[in-house]
Amino acid sequence: MKKLINDPMNVVPEALEGMAKAHPDLIKVHFNPNFVYRADAPRPGKVAVISGGGSGHEPMHVGFVGYGMLDAACPGAVFTSPTPDQMYEAAKTVHGGAGILMIVKNYAGDVMNFDMAADLLRGEGFQVESVLIADDVAVESSLYSQGRRGTGTTVLAEKILGAAAERGYDLQRLAALGRRVAENGRSMGMALTSCTVPHVGKPTFELGEDEMEIGIGIHGEPGRYREPLKKADEIVERLMEPILKDLPFKAGDRVICMVNSMGGTPLSELYIVYRKVAEICEKSGIQIVRNLVGAYITSLEMAGTSITLLRADDEMLELWDHPVKTPALRWGM
Amino acid sequence: MPVMRDDVVAWLERCAAVLEENRDYLTQLDAAIGDADHGANMDRGFKAFMAKLPSVADKDIGTILKTLGMTLVATVGGAGGPLYGTFFLQLGVKTANKLMLTPEDWTEALEAGINGVIARGQARPGDKTMVDALLPALEAFKEAIRNGDSFGKALQRMAEAAEQGMKATIPMVARKGRASYLGERSAGHQDPGATSSYLILKAAADTWANAT
């Protein structure tokens, strides 16, 4: 294992210490339990939007704390969900008197830990709603499984819901909007290389020099197919087909498109991917009205990409354009 | 003798020792169908509890079990934290203010713990989870008590049923948790959660073998 670290056991706290020093104007970091929260929290009268998940997906979620996005984010150990005491303390710290919205990715551990935190908070009289993101079309059959994993749509949901909370949406309206975003987003990812969890020390799976894994999750879980490596255009077609078919996206739809790096893929290659995504959308009569190209929801140093399309209505687009100021996403201010 | 407070403490100490011994075994089971952290997570949780145990060992059984539940919730993470945390919290709720346990107390506590696990994880029998070890164990214990077995003997039956339930998960196709993403490929592997559940119940049967 070759990593720029001091001690595998201290990766999460040392990264948080660095974040706090880099962005004192935007965020504060609380340790034991660990959470990152807005420097100006609590915001009276605003619904507090919180999220969290395993570490190793940075900038998600901790990089999205700040004006117009999250009030707090709870990082677990690398690829392990956070514990209820983190969400409980984070929610109490940022609660502005208008309730708490939790954005949760659909993994058994995340769902149960957030549920327990919500139970504890409700027991103390807080109003809590949660939005579950389950957008990964690589998980085909949800009938006999945990259901689809939460991936790229989470980033778009955090931006849109954060803006809505900033504009004064109440908790119920915010939760309803969140469910609409979750229903209209679809993602799929692929890997060129595996990744190494620091405290494990060896790659999560082995992938040959000439192989790729299609339909991976964001924790280095096995994908849907292992295949010989192909050219970028063919790979994009392979990812876009199940995404488009699933919702389905239709001619005339307006979408927000994210082309995401799994951590190790350079921006130049992401633009090669975006070029083909845009071409496929044009041919299908689907209009990409906003886009994000970069590393937003990663799996450590894995090389690979994921594509997310969100069918957006006027309300979502207006909220997308609302100013945002976080360590990892900033515009309009 | 019924199960006394000090017997409960001895059971939990034994759990911590057994989970430490089986740390790598549980992790290997989890590596095959999950994310290879179950052994390490359970060991971390019980070690954290052992550090707190001296401060609650002279309290009632409910307080001791609730402290264990809260510690697991805050230190284990993943799915195991909320599930085992809920299990021991529910055990603690049913044994609040008690300094000893009769077979009836244990039945009620175990039943509440298992119902808590089912409510939290939404798993049904046959989904290849800890429920597949816990539910048959509860049924076997109740039946043994109905048949007039001693407390200790009934606990033995409970542990045997948990072991059978654990082994019965091998051919099952997972329908809950991360193993469910593997679909058919999850068959042929013993469920790590059912295995840790068996180890915990076996520790009770071994520690309380002479209970009446």
Image (cartoon, coloured by chain):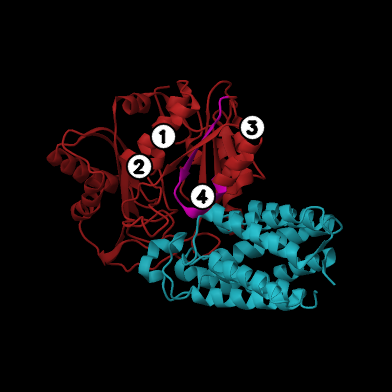
Q: Where is residue B146, by image quadrant?
A: bottom right
Mark 4 residue element: helix
- Residue closest to the far front: B147
Query: In the visual, does A294 lie left or right of A127?
Result: left
**Amino acid type, residue under disc 3 in the picture:** Gly
Mark 1 residue element: helix
CA–CA distance in space, label 4 to label 2: 25 Å
**A273 vs A312: above or below:** below
Tag shown at residue A294: 2
Q: Are marks 3 and 1 on the same chain?
A: yes
**Amino acid type, residue under disc 4 in the picture:** Asp
Expressed as whole percent of the image width and height from the top left, the position of residue A128 reads 55, 34
Q: Which residue is mark 1?
A: A178
CA–CA distance in space, label 3 to label 4: 23 Å
Q: Where is residue A93, by image quadrant?
A: top right
For the residues labelled 3 and 4, say whether their Cβ atoms are less than 8 Å apart: no
- Which residue is pictured at 46% across the width and 23% down the height? A169
Q: Which chain is red?
A: A
Tag shown at residue A110: 4
